[in-house]
């Protein structure tokens, strides 16, 4: 019989139970025992869902209190020295200090670097390793959870992050430069110990995730895979080596020939590789086909999936397993909660619970004698797929007409940056090291309650607008008191930087409980982008105008860019993503022109997700960058030279695409540097970035307050590779998730640092024959 399983399940809970438990623990409102109990309850519930669906094993080890990469680091005993010595076990508060910089106990320290997990919007904590790094099993969480699942009567399939992927994602601590592969032998000893311990618990199969195999790997890393798995093959368990998020390409032969009992292939991202892998797979190995998307929420085309599976089954027989393409971490938990969606749209969708059902339905359909219920379910799915294809809701003639006439629009600003900069300095006389924020200010309980009451109909529109105006006034006054140079309205009216715009654009639908974990306790609720996009009316002008009227200082209009809206939505899969991006760009272009006409002279268009959409293989990059950068340029192409266009990017590795970022031609780019040890700034030594840049000077994702000296030091380092005249001073991301008690002292330190540097520059400028604008 075909084996049905999943690579992982969402851990946050259908009602975000884990989020609220974590935040209560961090705030001191509940003890650790209560947090651990919530985790235990969620695990039991999720295992039971898998068992009830009919999976042949439940996945254990996919649950995490923050991040699965951090879990692996803790399991291996890899704790940076600044968090103190590890004696025996890595305790939960040390774990949280690594993630957040502080916890209910322990000395605060700089949090570990956070960046994007491959090409997803999930963030992981980068492991930090030393040349003399040692490894030892330092937590019992994985083994405890296996025992917990077994005690509940489940067949447990443990999952761990693979040694080569973990090592690939790591970075040398403290800027040391050494070959991380020199650590592999010692690392494998500890992995072998983990596998032996799992075998001792009765685990038959262990899933080892090696998504790095879908990347462009240097030859020495490819060779290391052979060395690693020859070392681990003696462990008394069967290894299912799982790859996902892309095609194996030049690593397909390597992967098929590794000494493991089975491999998992992402048949959604790499359908063209299925036949090749089926043909090449040694006769004793299992092939798990990820045929149900683990990353999008559209119902699986079961007829097409069955064609693929039956062809594989003809050669593999019972060696064929069926699964989602990746962990279901990247989709919401349960569509059954979405009673407010219309029936037609609901019939097109599938969340994590429903994807388990799809996997099991495909398994049953592969049986030689599928029962009547299975056949009826397959027929119903086929009807829904056809109805979606024919639905008039998908295509709007006016939008497609406008897209066809795009050649009439230029994708470039009217003048080059040097001329625009001069025009902007005339209308925006800003000091050296101008200070600003990224856009959002704390979303207080009062703000959230106001939006909630309005959405429920408990507040009139007039009262809602009065309250939002009051929040904006307070935010503007706070910024003036802090001495910031360019202000924002604070985004009190916005639930989310993508959802807010989707709610005002045609072609989007919204869930009530469609939450997906982004990092730690942070969840996002991506819109469902199902049809052609257009803007019925202005979206932000009313609030931007009101905010600008409250101050004599420059006010930024705040938009989310087309590629970020695209990458942070569940996007339709019936047309190229590039076409959808251009539809979004045209809608946002109209908004830029309306803001400009309303007197807003600075407009920030956030493209936080530009880098995460980059294909995992370098040879595919340029195609993506051409249309992604083109969409941004189209969005801003109508703006006058005097209008200063900003963009923001965060928590990704940008060094290798700086040329494309420069080609976006934003007047100012703000970008994360504080949490990545200034690694991004190193790229500017080789790449002369032409426009202005704000290297984020402190980490907003940590509750730690930066000192004036720390910010000065970062800016001085930045000024060694970027001319001071091009530098802006700002946090590294929006302040939505922080409290005012944290935001105020941090921004005070930031403004003070800028003033110190202005004074220093003023004192140095005469000796250099320059004029300082302070």
Image (cartoon, grey):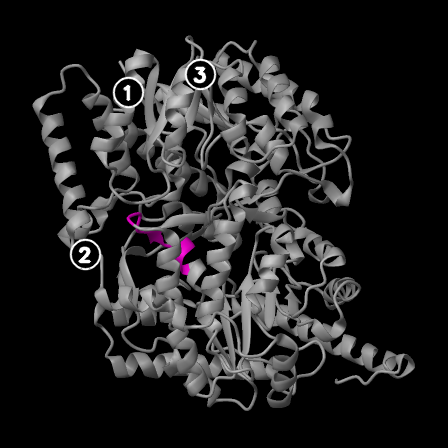
Which residue lies at the image location 35% right of the left edge and 58% below the top edge? 580
Judged by depth in the image, the label closer to the viewer, 2 or 1, is 1
| Secondary element at image label 2 | loop
How many numbered dots are placed on residues in this image?
3
Q: Position of residue 699 (x, y in %)?
A: 62, 59
- The residue lying toward the viewer, choosing from 13 and 605, is 605
- Taking the magenta stretch, the answer to whether it contains residue 566 is yes
Is 531 placed left or right of 647 in the picture?
left
Which residue lies at the image location 61% right of the left edge and 86% below the top edge? 423
Marks 2/3: CA distance? 47 Å
Q: Quadrant of the C terminus?
A: bottom right
| Secondary element at image label 3 | helix
- Mark number for residue 280? 3
Q: Position of residue 549 (x, y in %)?
A: 46, 90
The residue to which callout 1 is attached is 311
Q: Position of residue 683 (x, y in %)?
A: 71, 54
Q: Residues within 10 Å of mark 3 (few under 14, many from 20)?
A: few
- The residue lying toward the viewer, choosing from 218 and 138, is 218
- Mark number for residue 340? 2
Marks 2/1: CA distance? 39 Å
Q: Quadrant of the N terminus?
A: top left
Marks 3/1: CA distance? 14 Å
Q: Quadrant location of residue 596?
A: bottom left
First along the sequence among labels 2 and 3: 3
Q: Is 679 drawn above or below residue 244 in the view shown?
A: below
- Taking the magenta stretch, the answer to whether it contains residue 356 is no
Is 346 placed left or right of 489 in the picture?
left
């Amino acid at each position: 019989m075909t084996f049905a399983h999943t690579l992982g399940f969402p851990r946050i809970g259908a009602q975000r139970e884990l989020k609220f438990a974590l935040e209560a623990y961090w705030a001191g409102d509940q003890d650790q025992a209560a947090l651990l109990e919530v985790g235990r309850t969620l695990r039991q519930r999720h295992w039971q869902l898998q068992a009830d669906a009919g999976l042949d094993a439940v996945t254990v080890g996919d649950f995490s209190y923050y991040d699965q990469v951090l879990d692996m680091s803790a399991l291996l005993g890899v704790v940076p020295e600044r968090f103190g010595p590890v004696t025996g076990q890595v305790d939960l508060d040390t774990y949280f200090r690594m993630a957040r910089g502080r916890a209910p106990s322990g000395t605060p320290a700089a949090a570990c670097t956070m960046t994007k997990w491959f090409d997803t919007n999930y963030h992981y904590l980068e492991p930090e390793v030393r040349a003399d790094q040692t490894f030892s099993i330092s937590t019992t969480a994985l083994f405890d959870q296996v025992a917990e699942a077994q005690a509940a009567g489940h067949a447990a399939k443990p999952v761990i992050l693979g040694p080569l992927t973990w090592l690939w994602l790591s970075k040398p601590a403290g800027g040391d430069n050494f070959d991380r592969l020199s650590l592999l032998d010692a690392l494998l000893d500890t992995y072998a110990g983990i596998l032996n311990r799992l075998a001792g618990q009765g685990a038959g199969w262990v899933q080892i995730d090696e998504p790095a195999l879908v990347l462009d790997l240097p030859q020495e890393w490819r060779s290391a895979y052979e060395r690693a798995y020859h070392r681990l093959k003696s462990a008394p368990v069967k290894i299912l080596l799982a790859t996902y998020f892309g095609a194996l390409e030049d690593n397909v032969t390597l992967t098929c020939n590794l000494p493991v009992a089975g491999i998992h292939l992402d048949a959604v991202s790499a359908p063209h590789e299925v036949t090749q892998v089926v043909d090449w797979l040694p006769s004793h190995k299992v092939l798990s086909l990820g045929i149900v998307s683990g990353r999008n929420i559209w119902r699986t085309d079961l007829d097409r999936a069955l064609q693929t599976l039956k062809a594989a089954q003809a050669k593999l027989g019972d060696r064929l397993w069926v699964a989602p393409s990746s962990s279901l971490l990247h989709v919401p938990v349960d569509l059954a909660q979405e009673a407010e969606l219309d029936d037609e749209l609901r019939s097109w969708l599938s969340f994590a619970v429903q994807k388990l059902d799809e996997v099991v339905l495909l398994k049953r359909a592969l049986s030689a004698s599928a029962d009547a219920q299975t056949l009826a379910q397959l027929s119903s799915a086929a009807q829904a797929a056809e109805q979606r294809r024919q639905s008039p809701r998908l295509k709007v003639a006016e939008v497609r007409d406008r897209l066809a006439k795009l050649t009439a629009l230029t994708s470039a600003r009217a003048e080059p940056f040097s001329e625009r900069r001069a025009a902007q300095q005339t209308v925006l006389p800003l000091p050296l090291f101008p200070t600003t924020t990224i856009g959002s200010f704390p979303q207080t309980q009062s703000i959230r309650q106001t939006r909630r009451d309005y959405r429920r109909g408990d507040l009139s529109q007039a009262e809602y607008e009065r309250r939002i105006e009051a929040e904006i006034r307070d935010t503007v006054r706070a910024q003036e008191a802090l001495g910031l140079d360019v202000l924002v309205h604070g985004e009190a009216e916005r639930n989310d930087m993508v959802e807010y715009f989707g709610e005002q654009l045609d072609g989007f639908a919204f869930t009530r409980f469609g939450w997906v974990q982004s990092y730690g306790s942070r969840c996002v609720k991506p819109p469902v982008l199902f049809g052609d996009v257009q803007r019925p009316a202005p979206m932000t002008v009313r609030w931007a105008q009101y905010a600008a009227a409250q101050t004599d200082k420059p006010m930024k209009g705040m938009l989310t860019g087309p590629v970020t809206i695209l990458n942070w939505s569940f996007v339709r899969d019936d047309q190229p993503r590039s076409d959808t991006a251009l539809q979004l760009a045209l809608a946002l272009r109209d908004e830029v022109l309306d803001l400009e006409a309303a007197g807003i002279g600075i407009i920030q268009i956030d493209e936080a997700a530009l880098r995460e959409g980059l294909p995992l293989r370098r040879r595919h990059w340029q195609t993506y960058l051409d249309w992604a950068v083109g969409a941004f340029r189209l969005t801003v192409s109508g703006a006058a030279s005097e209008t200063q266009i900003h963009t923001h990017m965060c928590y990704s590795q940008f060094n290798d695409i700086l040329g494309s970022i420069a080609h976006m031609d934003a007047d100012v780019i703000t970008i994360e540097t504080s949490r990545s040890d200034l690694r991004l700034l190193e790229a500017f030594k080789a790449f002369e970035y032409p426009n202005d840049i704000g290297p984020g000077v402190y980490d907003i994702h940590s509750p730690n307050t930066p000192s004036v000296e720390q910010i000065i030091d970062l800016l001085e380092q930045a000024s060694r590779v970027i001319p001071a005249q091009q530098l802006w001073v700002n946090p590294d991301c929006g302040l939505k998730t922080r409290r005012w008690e944290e935001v105020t002292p941090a921004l005070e330190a930031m403004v003070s640092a800028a003033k110190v540097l202005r004074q220093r520059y003023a004192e140095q400028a005469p000796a250099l024959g320059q004029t300082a604008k302070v």
